[in-house]
Image (spheres, rainbow, N blue to C red):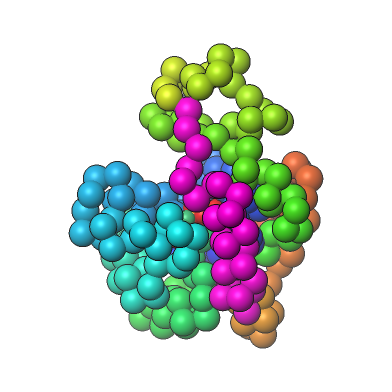
Amino acid sequence: MRVIFIGPPGAGKGTQAAKVVERWGVAHISTGDILRANVKKGTPLGLKAKEYMNAGQLVPDEVIIAMMKDRLREADCADGFILDGFPRTVPQAEALDALMKELQLDLDSALLFQVDDDTVVERLSGRRVCRKCGAIYHATFHPTAVEGVCDVCGGEIYQREDDRESVIRQRLAVYHEQTAPLIDYYRGQSRLLEVDAAGSSDSVLAVLESTLGA
Ligand code: ADP
Ligand code: ZN
């Protein structure tokens, strides 16, 4: 299985990816996670990416493309992958097509998570994350038992810098301008699948199961 997840921030791509990984054992490649790990470690890549990320802007294409060229050659990608957060622009999609061709691999599908902007703002402004294990909570819909403490590992709960409302609006604007054109791009390749991501459901697993026969 080689699948791309497309959707606005807060569409639940990461949550669904975790379920797909559990079910099919493919690699989950989240560009956001890779970038945040680099920011945390203070690597050259992290230093380049940090300002863009905190402002809700995209990191430049050439930086992302170089990073993904390395990542997709790693051994764990041989049995398939979910790309969560890449490609996010048409030039990134074109670079991915070129790389797939070079590696003689084929993409199965691009899965579009459909959810409206108000739902995104409600979800993300309440989102809280464990600093230690990455577990995800929501201040209203899924709070931790003890405020500020992770239920799973006891780690510290925090709010991502880019989950403040003004930055969320900026990320949504960037999504509509720069990422939404990928919908037509993959529709044109007959690879687009669409799922309703407004509720909490297992429709993603069902769609993948029925179309890929996995
Ligand atoms: P989101 O919740 O917005 O989907 P991610 O965790 O996927 O967040 O990404 C966080 C930030 O990392 C983005 O706002 C952007 O600055 C940067 N980023 C992640 N993936 C890409 C990409 N493919 N191209 C450019 N920037 C990216
Ligand atoms: Zn934790």
Q: Is residue 37 above or below residue 65?
A: above
For residue 38, side relative to residue 171 (left or right): left
Question: Within the magenta stretch, is there residue 169?
Answer: yes
Label tally: 0
| Residue nearest the viewer, comparing 80 with 83 | 83
Residue at image position (50%, 37%) is: 159
Residue at image position (37%, 49%) is: 36
Where does the C terminus fall, quadrant-wise? bottom right
Where residue 75 appears, as percent x and y from the top left, is: 31, 56
Question: Within the magenta stretch, is there residue 51?
Answer: no
The image quadrant that residue 68 belongs to is bottom left
Where residue 8 appears, as percent x and y from the top left, is: 63, 60
For residue 159, side relative to residue 125 (left or right): left
Q: Which residues are magenta?
A: 157-181
The image quadrant that residue 180 belongs to is bottom right
| Residue nearest the viewer, comparing 86 with 36 | 36
| Residue nearest the viewer, comparing 40 with 134 | 40
Residue at image position (55%, 18%) is: 147
Is residue 84 in view from this perspective?
A: no
Residue at image position (39%, 75%) is: 61
